[in-house]
Image: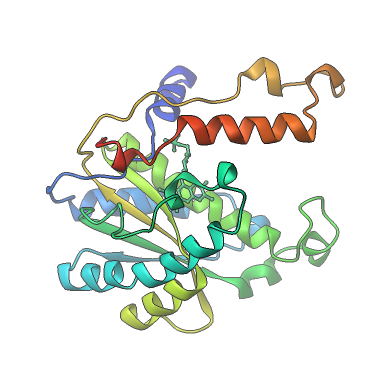
């Protein structure tokens, strides 16, 4: 694969939130997880493990457990000024957008692996918080899942998991207490073609040989950026996409 093919893949990967009723082969799932396990990790700690959920009854249990914690998140979101509220939580949630996904990959993390990194990384590095290395390791493993899914012609959605939902998922799947449900990847064949998305232009975010202050964003700029996102984005699954 040359760099242009790689960039094609990066551009092709998009968050997909509705899926065809078509199975995904076990072999493809394992290829996706192969990509994930080769992610970079601080000190080579490799905190990740995966529960692949294809069984319909188990998936239904996970979907059913989604609503109450998401309503909690909805009410917290209502405490923000209306124009900044996240578009996924502007209206009372009723059902998970990823309900059609034939495969859910539950990504687990083991924080005990922090022992693999230099201790100072957790306290002194620019990343800040004590679990920053762990979080970044898990994000790398997640990113590879979604890129690999796109390479396999699949759609995927990165699903954040809040602590309330995680507790139910752990019970449903029998996950040991010490492991953390980090996120879920919903995987399946896309049921729609996503609209083109937006990324900040390279010339706005790249600086050469020092920070170019003409590109510096004030707090107002950031606020306006978020407002623009909010205005332009309605939940894709509610736009019928
Ligand atoms: C840390 C993180 C959490 C995310 N959580 C969710 C989520 O809970 N539900 C969802 O539909 N998308 C989620 N996303 C996907 C983003 O909404 C998506 O990547 C972004 O809007 C850009 O769109 P694109 O992926 O189509 O390029 C998450 C992405 C990241 C990196």
Query: On the image, which quarter does residue 228 sit in?
Result: top right
Residue at the farthest front position: 82
Q: Closest to the observer: 71 or 105?
A: 71
* Residue under the image location 68 percent in, 67 percent down: 116
The percent position of residue 174, horizontal first and vertical second, equals 35, 83
* Residue under the image location 70 percent in, 71 percent down: 115
Left or right: where does residue 238 sit relative to residue 134?
left
Query: On the image, which quarter does residue 77 sit in?
Result: bottom right
Please say if 85 is above or below 209.
below
The percent position of residue 213, horizontal first and vertical second, equals 86, 21
Q: Closest to the observer: 122 or 63?
A: 63
Is residue 1 among the parts visible in the rendering?
A: no
Query: On the image, which quarter does residue 96 sit in?
Result: bottom left
Where does the N terminus fall, quadrant-wise?
top left
Left or right: where does residue 136 sit relative to residue 208?
left
Please say if 181 is above or below 16.
below
* Residue under the image location 42 percent in, 66 percent down: 71
Please say if 42 is above or below 177.
above
Where does the C terminus fall, quadrant-wise?
top left
The percent position of residue 45, horizontal first and vertical second, equals 61, 63
Q: Closest to the observer: 180 or 121?
A: 180
Residue at the farthest left position: 22
The percent position of residue 197, horizontal first and vertical second, equals 44, 26
* Residue under the image location 30 percent in, 52 percent down: 97
Left or right: where does residue 191 sit relative to residue 238?
left
Please say if 158 is above or below 95.
above
């Amino acid at each position: 694969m040359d760099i242009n093919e790689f960039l094609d893949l990066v551009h092709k990967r998009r968050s997909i939130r509705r899926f065809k009723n078509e199975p995904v082969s076990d072999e493809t799932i394992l290829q996706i997880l192969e990509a994930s396990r080769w992610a970079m990790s601080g000190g080579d700690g490799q905190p990740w493990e995966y529960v692949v959920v294809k069984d319909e009854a188990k998936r239904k249990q996970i979907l059913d457990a989604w609503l109450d914690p998401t309503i909690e998140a909805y009410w917290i979101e209502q405490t923000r000024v209306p124009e900044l509220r996240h578009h996924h939580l502007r209206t009372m949630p009723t059902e998970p957008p990823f309900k059609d996904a034939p495969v859910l990959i539950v990504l687990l993390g083991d924080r005990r692996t922090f022992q693999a990194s230099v201790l100072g990384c957790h306290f002194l590095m620019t990343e800040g918080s004590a679990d920053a290395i762990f979080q970044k390791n898990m994000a790398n493993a997640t990113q590879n899942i979604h890129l690999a899914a796109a390479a396999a012609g699949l759609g995927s959605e990165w699903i954040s998991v809040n602590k309330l939902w995680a507790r139910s998922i752990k019970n449903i799947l029998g996950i040991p207490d010490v492991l953390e449900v980090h996120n879920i990847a919903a995987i399946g064949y896309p049921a729609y073609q996503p609209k083109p998305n937006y990324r900040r232009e390279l010339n706005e975010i790249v600086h050469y040989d020092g920070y170019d202050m003409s590109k510096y964003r004030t707090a107002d700029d950031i606020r306006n950026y978020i407002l623009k996102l909010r205005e332009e984005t309605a939940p894709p699954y509610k736009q019928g996409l």
